[in-house]
Every structure is written in C-alpha cells, then in structure tokens.
Amino acid sequence: MLCRSCNVLFRVQCTSKLNIMRSTAKQSATEERDPAPIFFNSNVQQLLKKLTRVDLNKVFRTKNYGVPLRAPEYKFLTTEELDEAMKNAEKKAERKLQMPPVVKVRTEEPEVLSYDCELQDHSETKFVFTDISFGFSDRERMIVVRDVNGTLRKATPDERHRMNETYFPRSGRKLRMPHMFEKEYLKRLLDQGNYEFVLDRACLQFEPDDPTYQDVTATTYEAVERAQHYNSLRSTRHFGPFAFHLAWNKSIDSLLLDLIETDRLDEAVSLIQLYHIVNPEAKSVSSHFEPGLEHSFIQAYVESDSKKRSVLELALQANVELHKQRAEVEAGVRRAHGHT
C-alpha cells in the first residue's frame, strides 16, 4: 500500500511538472516565427528558383570531393536526339537544384510516456528499445528509452540519430558529428571559400530542423554575405535558402546592389518581392510591380526600407544612365540602316 501511494504521488508530481514544461515550451514556440509556411509557398518557391539562375554548365560540373572521376562518354546525335537530351538534362538539373527545406528548430524535450518508481535504480544504465521493422522512416520509427529513475520516454533527437545510424546507416553520414563542423575548423573552411562543400556536407549529416545544422548554414550564409561571394552559390541548390535567409533577416541590400550593378533588374525585382512576402510589415510593400517599370519599383524599396540607401541610389542612377545610352545607341543603329 505504501509503495502504491508513493507511486501515485510521484506520478501526480511528475505530471504537474510535465504540464508546466509543456505549456512553457508551447508558449515559447508560438512566440518564435515559423519560416516553413512562407518558404514552401508556391510564389516564394518560384522567386527563389528565379534567383538561383540555372546554369547547366555549373550544375553538371565535376566536384572534387574525393570521388573517382568517370571517363567522359561521347555520342553522335541527331538534332531531334540532341533536343531530347537537353530536355532530360534540364529535368535532371531541376532535381539536382532541389532546395534544402527551411524549417523551425526542433524542440529537444522528449515526450514522457510513463513513470514507474518500481523500476527506479533497477539498473545502472538506461535501456534503448528500437523498432527495426522495415518500411518506417527515421522520424516515424518507434524508439523509446527507459531511464535509470524508471522513466519511460521517447528518444531524444540525438539518441534517435544514433539508433538510426546503428541499424540503418546512410552512406556518407557519420555516427558522430565530423570535426569540420566545430567552430575552429568551420571558420578555416569558410575562409578558404568552401561554402558549397560545407553546405552539402551539412545536408548529408544533419536533419533540417537540427540546431547544429541551422547554426552551420547560418554561419556559412553570413560568411558568403560578408565576402559577397554570391556566384559561389549561384546555380546550386543552396542559393534559394541563402536568399531566403537574407530576406528573413532583412539584409538583402548587398545582394540587391550586386544585381543592380550586373544589370539583373528582373532578379532585383524578384528579390524585393521575396522581401515583401517574408516581411509584410515593410513600408514599400504597397508598391506593385508593372513590367517595364523595374527602376521605379526598386526605387520605392530603396527609399522606404533599404539600409544602404545612398549606395543603392547611386547604383540605380548609373543603371538608368546605362539603359539610356543603350537606347540611344540602338536608335542610332536603326537610323543608320534607314529605319525610323
């Protein structure tokens, strides 16, 4: 009787503590903004694909990741076969440029299933029970842990990762985090400009909602932004999440300046439209784009929301003068050929 009453009291106390922890976690989760619904929006996806700027030569280039190179294969094709091969290459490029998802950081608090004080200190180590049946994903697979104090709970993300890698290892994924993601080694890789290698490796090692994954990607994006090495990520699957990261943190001015200076006004418009979707409270969100009025649309953002207004205005004015000079040259060529 005494053990049973103690067990009931223990369950009540632990349940009340658990409810408090859950309510606190829910409150903090609601306060944090979730980027997933915005990132997976169809309009946002179209804008990110446009900003990625697909270049087939770069998409299918050889990456020196320590993998043996294959000998090139040459074929003689007719015009029809060549067109079909190009269409297949474009479809394959679209699959290779599939963007890693941008989601909210997961919560580390595992769900408690039961408290059994009868099993407290029954063993000096905890027990991990894993369902190794086929047909389940790594997230859906049932993995529970019996702690030393008698608590039966679901596995933490780290425990789930280790169990999945033990029974169902993935090629290239390590059981323990590689040293390259530690702060010292990561900084060295980023200083050398190995941005794509770091991001590719992070996608292989971690899940998108892993805190370490999000720290590594954010650090890499900030390094690219500081160095303004935008071409290192263009035509890769990481440029879309990179542009989304800039819009999410309201820091698109440097990328916008690069697009204006390289006369990519259509992409500059897409970047600002992305900024408006991600930040609906922006002052320039009321401005609407009309074809042929790229300069005025960009100018509305520069005047209302940019943090580098003077630099962007000078670049935009220089671009306006460039387009005027081109128009004058084209008009002179038409007059020289007798066209009015």
Image (cartoon, helix red, strand yellow):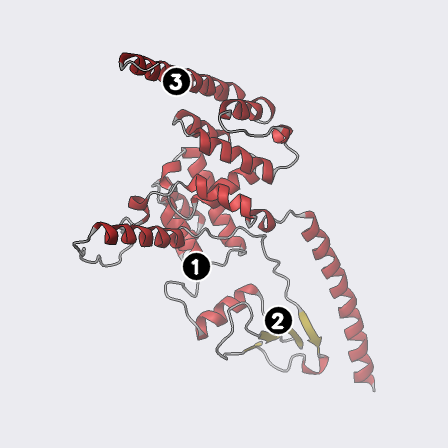
Residue under the image location 64 percent in, 30 percent down:
286
Residue under the image location 45 percent in, 75 percent down:
167
Question: Which is more toward the observer, 12 or 319?
Answer: 319
Q: Residues within 10 Å of mark 2 (few under 14, many from 20)?
A: many
**Mark 3 or 1, nearer chain start:** 1
Q: Is residue 219 visible in this depiction of the protein?
A: no
Residue behind mark 1 = 205
Q: As shown in the figure, which amino acid type bears the numbered disc 2?
A: Lys
Q: Is residue 120 visible in this depiction of the protein?
A: yes
Residue 261 circle label: none
Above or below: residue 1 compared with residue 34: below
Measure the C-alpha gap from mark 3 to mark 1. 47 Å
Residue behind mark 2 = 154
**Secondary structure found at label 3:** helix
**Mark 1 or 2, nearer chain start:** 2
Q: Position of residue 130 (x, y in %)?
A: 53, 77
Residue 322 circle label: 3
- Of badges 3 and 1, the one in the foreground is 3
Q: Residues within 10 Å of mark 3 (few under 14, many from 20)?
A: few
Measure the C-alpha gap from mark 3 to mark 2. 63 Å
Residue under the image location 40 percent in, 64 percent down:
174
Q: As shown in the figure, which amino acid type bears the numbered disc 3?
A: Leu
Residue under the image location 22 percent in, 57 percent down:
69
Measure the C-alpha gap from mark 1 to mark 2. 22 Å
Q: As shown in the figure, which amino acid type bears the numbered disc 1?
A: Gln
